[in-house]
Amino acid sequence: MFALPFFRRDLPALKGEKVTLRVPLTNDYREWSAVRGESRAFLEPWEPRWQPDELDRAAWRLRIGRYREDYAQGTAIAFFIFEKSSGKLAGGITLGNIRHGVAQSGHIGYWIGERFGGRGLMTEAVKLVSRFAFDTLRLHRIEAACIPENARSIRVLEKAGFRREGLLRSYLRINGIWQDHYLYARIADDLPGDGTKG
């Protein structure tokens, strides 16, 4: 796939008031596995079913390889979210399924460690990635999907200016079950904070 010239350069960190976002590095393994491990029960209802080796170092190396390959091809960029006040890894956010041409769109997905929830970190991370997608990558549309029962994720998206556009039936297999998802989107022309329930 054609990679934009941007993707051949080192990606700068994205900095906000509460968080710093940067690409995952191989030596992030211990902190990543610790925060994911302690948050397992919190995360599992909203994610694809965890594999038995989910937190193993070998699986981590494969994950890092996939991040790098997607980045090199220009199809996705994964960021880790670090809380500025503590410097600790709080979660992750990915801008994936990046398409150019007539679509000029991407899709975001994210997770946060349980002890970091409720602090506004993810809302700021979603806003930073949105700005990056619109201003740097020149995308026109960003989509996100969440399970209707995931009230926390719905709040994050709406605070970040996303609008609910509809219901996607049996959209993703989450924790072993095909789940309906709300589709949310933000357009480059949307005003900041213009998220509304659809």
Image: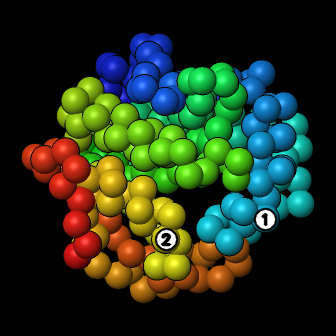
Q: Residues within 10 Å of mark 1 (few under 14, many from 20)?
A: few
Mark 1 residue element: helix
Residue drawn at x 49%, y 53% is 109
Q: Residue 80, relative to residue 175: is it above or below?
A: above
Residue pointed to by mark 2:
151
> The N terminus lies in which quarter of the figure?
top left
Mark 2 residue element: helix
Amino acid under disc 2: Ala
The reply to whether residue 90 is visible in this rendering is yes
Write down the quadrant of residue 137 in the picture.
top left
Q: Position of residue 148 (x, y in %)?
A: 46, 79
Residue drawn at x 71%, y 78% is 176
Q: Are marks 2 and 1 in contact (CB under 8 Å)?
A: no
Residues under labels 2 and 1: Cα distance? 17 Å
Residue pointed to by mark 1:
41
Q: Position of residue 197 (x, y in %)?
A: 26, 72
In the picture, measured across the screen, residue 28 lies left or right of residue 140, that is right
Residue drawn at x 76%, y 37% is 32
What is the basis of the colouring in this image? rainbow
Q: Position of residue 72 (x, y in %)?
A: 49, 28
> The C terminus lies in which quarter of the figure?
bottom left
Q: Residue furthest bottom?
A: 169
Amino acid under disc 1: Ala
Write down the quadrant of residue 68 in the picture.
top right
Q: Position of residue 2 (x, y in %)?
A: 35, 33
Of the image marks 2 and 1, the number of the one nearer the N terminus: 1
In the picture, measured across the screen, residue 98 lies left or right of residue 44, that is left
Residue drawn at x 57%, y 34% is 81
Q: Residue 59, relative to residue 166: is it above or below?
A: above
The reply to whether residue 68 is visible in this rendering is no
